Amino acid sequence: MKIKYTEQFLKEVAKFSEEIREDLFKTVELYLSGARLSKTQFRTFNLAKGVKIQEFKVRDSGGNLRAFSFLLGASTLTFVYAFNKKSQKLLAKEKKLILRRVKEVRNEQN
């Protein structure tokens, strides 16, 4: 499986420490290798009709990094958003942002 990162995602993830970025990418590697990840590391859910999202979770002393991706076609895991999560639930503004970015990436492919 290929991995794609949007430009916005790369800018957002660059704001985090090198250590937490390394932990994130190790978690992604585990996922891609077929390892079963715990609920504290990963979850997948439908954000809207036809939009299935993967949420990668990494925690350190600086906070809770969340990275969101979706499958583009059958073989490309595309990362669209990363942020430091502070609340229990995913806020409506963050959901809208993720959906907008998914739509933009899909439109670029067509």
Image (tube, rainbow, N blue to C red):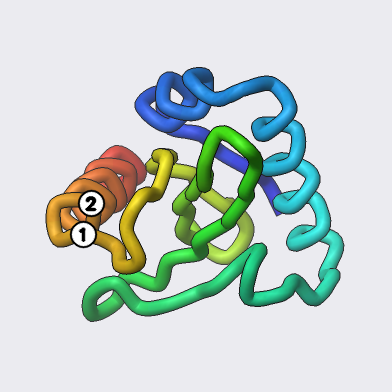
Q: Residue at x 62, y 38 (%)?
A: 61
Residues packed near mark 1 inside 10 Å, few (<14), some (14 to 19) or many (20 plus): few
Q: Amino acid at mark 1?
A: Leu
Q: Which residue carries the number 2 mark?
A: 94
Residues packed near mark 2 inside 10 Å, few (<14), some (14 to 19) or many (20 plus): few
Q: Amino acid at mark 2?
A: Glu
Against 24, residue 96 (above or below) is below
Against 69, residue 41 (above or below) is below
The image quadrant that residue 51 belongs to is bottom left
Are discs 2 and 1 less than 8 Å apart at CB?
yes
Q: Secondary structure at mark 2?
A: helix
Badge number at residue 91: 1
Most foreground residue, 104 or 18: 18
Most foreground residue, 65 or 75: 65
Left/right of residue 28 with respect to residue 57 in the rendered view = right
Badge number at residue 109: none
Residue 99 position, x and y percent, is 23, 56
Against 33, residue 109 (above or below) is above
Residue 107 position, x and y percent, is 24, 46
Q: Residue at x 63, y 75 (%)?
A: 39
Nearer the camera: disc 2 or disc 1: 1
Q: Residue at x 48, y 53 (%)?
A: 69
Q: CA distance from mark 2 to mark 1?
A: 5 Å
Q: How many marks?
A: 2
